[in-house]
Image (tube, rainbow, N blue to C red):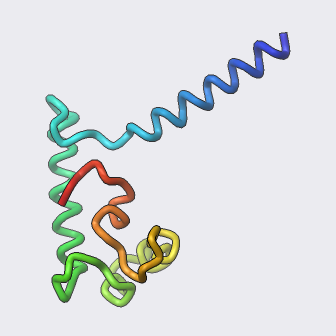
């Protein structure tokens, strides 16, 4: 019985991980889901472009300082490739929406 319970827990955890990976809707999803994705992407583009003062397509820590507490506090963690900048994908946290 304990074995089945542990298997059930493992399956539940695996399911949660798989769902977490697909939480970001695709831009070409039909209906409301796609509409929401496109609207959210547009807001993200406007925000990213507003932060990108020198219009080089990446965000330096200085560009987000005093504009976004979250980005300022988490900059090092979000900078996945450790180049000192946030790319579009690093800013979003995923690569499902090309810029």
- Residue 71 pos. (x, y %): 41, 74
Depth check, front residue: 22 or 35: 22
- Position of residue 37 relative to residue 48, above or below, is above
Q: Residue at x 63, y 23 (%)?
A: 11
* Residue sticking out furthest to the top: 1
Number of marks = 0
Residue 20, horizontal then vertical, whole percent: 47, 39
**Residue 70 figure quarter:** bottom left
User: Relative to residue 83, is residue 46 depicted above or below?
Assistant: above
Asked if residue 93 lies left or right of residue 42, the reply is right
Corner quadrant of residue 68:
bottom left
Name the residue at the right extreme.
2
Q: Residue 83's spot in the image, x, y percent?
A: 42, 80
Picture quarter with the N terminus: top right
Instruction: For the C terminus, give its image quadrant.
Output: bottom left
- Going 19% across and 77% down the picture, which residue do you hit? 50
In the image: residue 23, left or right of residue 15: left
The residue positioned 18% from the left and 33% from the top of the image is 32
Horizontal and vertical percent position of residue 48 = 23, 71
- Residue closer to the observer: 18 or 40: 18
Q: Residue at x 24, y 79 (%)?
A: 51
């Amino acid at each position: 019985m304990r074995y089945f319970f542990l298997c059930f827990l493992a399956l539940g955890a695996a399911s949660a991980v798989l769902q977490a990976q697909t939480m970001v809707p695709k831009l070409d999803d039909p209906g409301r889901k796609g509409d929401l994705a496109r609207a959210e992407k547009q807001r993200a583009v406007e925000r990213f472009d507003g932060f990108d003062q020198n219009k080089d397509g990446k965000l330096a820590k200085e560009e987000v300082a005093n504009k976004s507490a979250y980005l300022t506090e988490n900059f090092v963690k979000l900078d996945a490739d450790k180049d000192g900048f946030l790319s579009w994908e690093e800013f979003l946290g995923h690569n499902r929406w090309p810029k």
